[in-house]
Image: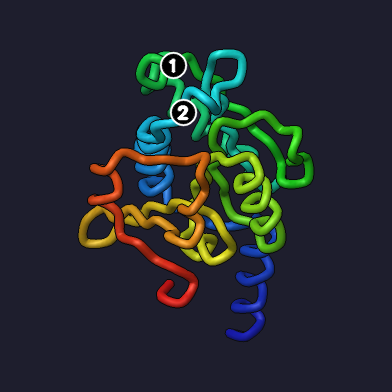
């Protein structure tokens, strides 16, 4: 009987998608836009004079990204610092090189992370990930809540000449690569 209950719980978890930590989502939604602004070349990534913050998600996570968008809008009043912004919600299946983005924030997917990382690299834009494991696949930043808040930076993907962060950010992050994740 216990095996049947366990199996049902696994099936329900798979059917309803990934489980997200609400506190971590809010921390990332607060911090990632500020990190994006620390790119010295942010002006080169504006689309029609504004920041396009693209959140990429799986179809089952639509309600999560809508909550993130609402949280960001409530806390930023339409501007990231001095830049007018727009939040673009894009399903993994709809993401392409033609998708407009100043930066990309990725929720979880079992199959599409490589595609997002490649697009971010080709465009020379910053990519943020909900899950630190996705840095192995080429995304640039993740934020985790441990004993304190820790910002991780994938040093292998920092080599892009289109992204240039202020030195103070690089002093705060914990660098990782595929071998020590």
Residue at the spot x=66%, y=72% of the render? 8
Residue 149 drawn at (x, y percent): 26, 53
Residue at the spot x=39%, y=30% of the render? 37
Tally the marks: 2
Q: In this view, does 52 lie to the left or right of 36?
A: right
Report whether residue 29 is seen.
yes
Secondary element at image label 1: strand
Q: In which quarter of the image is the N terminus?
A: bottom right
Residue at the spot x=53%, y=26% of the render? 44
Query: Quadrant of the rendered structure where residue 11 is?
Result: bottom right
Q: In this view, does 60 lie to the left or right of 77?
A: right
Residue closest to the eye, 169 or 67: 169
Residue 62 drawn at (x, y percent): 64, 39
Residue closest to the eye, 65 or 83: 83
Report whether residue 26 is seen.
no
Label 2: few (<14), some or many (≥20) within 10 Å?
Answer: many
Residue at the spot x=58%, y=41% of the render? 124
Structure colour scheme: rainbow
Which residue matches tag 2?
Answer: 42
Residue 125 drawn at (x, y percent): 55, 39
Q: Quadrant of the C terminus?
A: bottom left
Secondary element at image label 2: helix
In the image, residue 9 above or below residue 21? below
Residue 120 drawn at (x, y percent): 61, 45
Mark 1 and 2 residues: CB-CB less than 8 Å, in contact? yes
Residue closest to the eye, 175 or 17: 175
Which residue matches tag 1?
Answer: 83
Label 1: few (<14), some or many (≥20) within 10 Å?
Answer: some
């Amino acid at each position: 009987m216990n095996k049947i209950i366990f199996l049902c719980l696994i099936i329900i978890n798979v059917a309803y998608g990934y489980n997200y930590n609400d506190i971590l989502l809010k921390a990332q939604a607060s911090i990632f836009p500020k990190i994006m602004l620390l790119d010295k070349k942010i002006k080169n990534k504006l689309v029609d004079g504004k920041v396009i913050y693209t959140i990429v998600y799986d179809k089952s996570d639509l309600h999560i990204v809508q909550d993130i968008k609402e949280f960001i809008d409530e806390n930023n009043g339409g501007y990231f610092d001095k830049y007018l912004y727009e939040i673009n919600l894009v399903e993994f299946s709809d993401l392409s090189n033609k998708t407009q983005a100043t930066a990309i924030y990725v929720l979880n997917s079992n199959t599409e992370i490589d595609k997002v990382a490649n697009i971010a690299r080709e465009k020379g834009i910053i990519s943020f990930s909900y899950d630190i494991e996705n840095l192995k696949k080429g995304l640039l930043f993740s934020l985790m809540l441990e004993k304190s808040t820790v910002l991780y930076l994938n040093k292998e993907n920092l080599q892009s000449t289109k992204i240039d962060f202020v030195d103070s950010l690089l002093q705060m992050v914990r660098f990782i690569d595929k071998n020590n994740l």
